[in-house]
Image: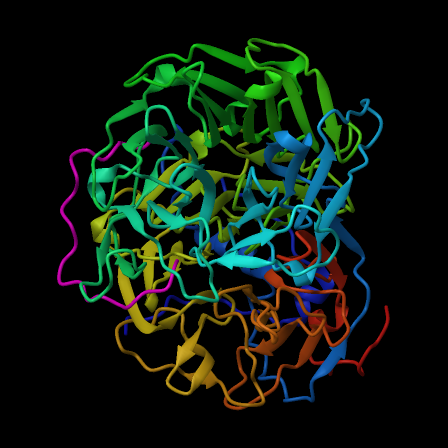
Amino acid sequence: MRARPIVFPLTVMLLATLGVGSLHETGGGSGRLVAFDSFPQTDPLTCEWEVAAVDGASPPLSATARFQFLQRQGGGGSPRAAIPPLVPTATSTRAPLRFIQDANAVFSAVTVDTPRNEVVLTDENRFRIFVFDRLATSGPTSRTEPKRVIGGLSTATQYQSSVYVDPPTGDIYAVNNDTVHEVSIFPRTAQGDVRPARTIPTVYGSFSVAADEERQELFFTVQHSGAVMVFNKTASSRANDVAVRMILGKSTQLADPHGIAFDPQRKVIYVANWGTSREFIRDPRAGRTEYTQAAVPGSGRFVPPSITVYPANADQDVAPLRVIQGPKTGLDWPTNIAVDPGRGELYVANSGGHSVLVFDVNAQGDVAPLRVVKGARTELQFPTGVFVDAANDELWVANFGGHSATVYPRDAKGDVAPKRVIRSAPRDEPFPGISNPYSIAYDPGREEVIVPSCVANPQIGMFSRTADKTAAPTRRIVGQNSKLNRTVHGVNYDEVHDEIFVSSQIAQAVLAFSGTQSGNVPPVRIIQGPKTQISVPEMVEVDPVHNELFVPARDRVLVFNRTDSGNVAPKRVLMVPAARVAVDYVHNLLAVSGRGRTGAQIAIFDYDAEGTTPPLRVISGVNAEPLGGLRHGFDIHPATGMILVSVPFGETGGDGLPLLASDQSFVGIWSVFDSGNVAPRWRLGGPNGVIRNPRGVAVDAKNKTVLVSDKYLNGVLTFSFPEMFEAGLAPRDANTAD
C-alpha cells in the first residue's frame, strides 16, 4: 500500500460551529455471468464525442487551499476525533422541512382509441393511466377532467413510457420502463387501484410498443442491451411465455432504442435510437430469445441519434435496411415515434429539440425532415409521446415537460398553435422534471440541490436549497449534447473545483460538467473506453482533496485521477464487492457497500487501499440488516465520519405483486468507526414515516439537514437532523419531533 499524504485534522466539533461553505479553487436485465478474457479493440466506427472547451485541467490543491478546505469540512489542525461510543438506534419519523414534488400528472405517452373516441395518456410522475374524451380540452388556466384513472400500488405500474390500445377490445397495454419488468394489461373500463388482468413478461428497460394486427404480434424496444423483442399479443407471464423473435447484436446498430413503429403496408419496423450503446456477449446456453447476456467492460460508446429500419420478420443480429442519421435530420433525443402508412410519413417526438419531426418513410442517410412542428405557439415542451389519428386527421403529442397533451392537424408544420390541449395543470405551473431520482448531491456555495433524473426524459436539475412543492429548477442540463441517457443513477459534486460528475451506465462512462453549465451542453470531459474497465457504473464518487474519482464495478473499485479524460486505465484497483462507494477525506477512509460472503456489508478501508488489501473493519450481520445502499443512496459526512445509507424496504411483496413502496423504508446512519454486527445509530424515516422508496442521500452541513430522494414519490425531501452534526452527543429518543 502506498504511503498516505499528510492531512492536518481538526476536531469534528468545528463543523458544528462553522458549518460548511464552498471553496472554488481557480485553476440490466438478469443473466448468467460470462468471463471476459480480454477487452475489445477500439471500434473505428465509434463516434468521437463532443466535449466543451476548457482552459486546462485544474492543478492539485495547494497546501494552503487543501488546509482551508479541510478546515471547512472539520478536518484540519488538531488530532483526529475520538471513536464515538456505540449507542442504541434512535428513530425519527419527523416530517420533512421541505418536499420538492410535482403533484401533477406528467404525460409521457399517448394513444387514441378511435372506435370509442377516447384518448389514453400515461403519467410517469404519479404512475397513473388517464382516459379522456377525445374532444376534451382546457384553457391555459384550468385542468382537464378525465373519464377514468387507473392508479395505485395494486396496478403494478411504474414509469409507463409507452401505451397501446387493442382495437377490438379496447384493452390498455402499459409498458413499464423501470422497477416493474412486465407489460400491464387492463380492461378498457378499468379504473382506480385495480390489478392488471394480465401481464406480458418483457424485461427490465423495455420502452416502447408497436403492434402488427395481422400477425397479432407486439414489438418492444429494450434500452439497456439495444434490442427489440417480439411477443405474441396473447403472451402471459403466468404461462411463462417467451418472445418469438429478438433483434439483438452489433450489426443491428441499435443504440439505446426508444420508440418503435410498425408499417403494415411496407412490412417494416422503425426504431428511434438515442445513440448510446455497449457490447454484449450472449450466454451460449441460452435460448434464441432468452434475455441472458453480459456487457463487455469498456465497450460503451456514444454515436449520433438515428432511426433504423428493419424487416418486420427480422430476427437476431441483422443489419438495418436503412438508417436516418446525421446533423441535417435534427434528431435530438428522438423518443416515441408513429407511422402514417397511407401518407408514407414517419413522425418523431423529438424531446431534446422540443419539436415533432416528420420524415418520408423511405428516407435514409443525412436528410432533413419533410416538415417540423416547433415554436412557442406549439406549446411543445420535451415531447416524448406521439400518435397519428388518421381517422380524425389529427396529430397527438404527449409533453413530458408541459403537463399537457396537444393536438394538431395531421399536416401541421412550423410554429402552429394546437387545436386542443389536455392539461393536468395550468400552463404556467412550474415543472420540476424529477423522475426516478437516484444519487443526489449538494452544492453549498450556490446552496443548490443537484438532482439527477432518468427514464423517459433525463436531466440534471439544480434546485434552490429552499425549493418546495412544485418548484422548477434554477437550471438544468438536458438534451442530446449532454450525453445523458436513461440510467443517470449517479451524480457527485466537487465544490473545490466546481464540477459535477455523472455516471452513465449504458455508455460505461463518467461525464464531467462544469458547475456553471446549463441547457443542452456537452460535458467538459468523458472517461470511456476499453482501458477503463468500467462495466455498469451505478455511481461515481469524487475526492476533491486527493483529486481522485472512485467508480464501483461490482467486484472492484476503479480509481482514476479527477482530471482523467478519454480511454485511460485506472490508477489503482481495489478488489471488493462494490455497489456504492463513499470517501471520508477527513479521516482518510473509503467505505464500500456490497454483498460479501455473509450478506450485505459496508467495508471500511484506508482511502488508498488497492489490490486484495483486506478492510480495516466490516459492518455486517443481523443487527445491521437490512443495510440497503447496495444499489441506492450511500454518502459520508466526512467531518463526523457518519455513513448515510438509504434502505428501501424491499422491492417484492406477497400476492404476486411487487412491493413498490413501503412506509417502513428509512435512511440508516452508521459511523466509519463501527464494526461488526451493529445496528445503525439513527434511522430517519420508518416505521410509519413519509419516506417510501429512498434512493439518494446528501448532507447540507451548514443548515444541519439531510436530503433524501425518493423513487416512488419522485421527489426530494429535506429533513432537519441536527443531532447527527452534534459530535459526541448521543441520538435522541425515538420519534423526536423538531
Q: Which residues are magenta?
A: 27-50
* Residue 65 spot, x, y in % from top left: 50, 51
Residue 422 placement: quadrant:
top right
Residue 329 placement: quadrant:
top left
Number of labels in the image equals 0
Residue drawn at (58%, 29%), measured in percent from left and top?
Answer: 382
Q: Nearer the viewer, residue 10 or 548?
A: 548
Residue 486 appears in the figure: no
* Residue 530 spot, x, y in % from top left: 21, 50
Q: Give above or below for 478 relative to 221.
A: above
Magenta stretch, main secondary structure, is loop
Classify the position of the N terminus by image quarter: bottom left
* Residue 38 spot, x, y in % from top left: 13, 58
Q: Give above or below for 654 relative to 284.
A: below
Q: Is residue 367 left or right of residue 489?
A: left
Q: Is residue 410 left or right of residue 30?
A: right
Residue drawn at (45%, 34%), measured in percent from left and top?
Answer: 482
Residue 701 appears in the figure: yes
Q: Give above or below for 652 relative to 569.
A: below
Q: Give above or below for 133 relative to 395.
A: below
Classify the position of the C terminus by image quarter: bottom right
Membership of 78 in magenta stretch:
no
* Residue 42 spot, x, y in % from top left: 16, 42
Q: How is the image coloured?
A: rainbow
Residue drawn at (51%, 89%), measured in percent from left and top?
Answer: 621
Residue drawn at (23%, 35%), measured in percent from left and top?
Answer: 46
Q: Nearer the viewer, residue 148 or 365?
A: 148
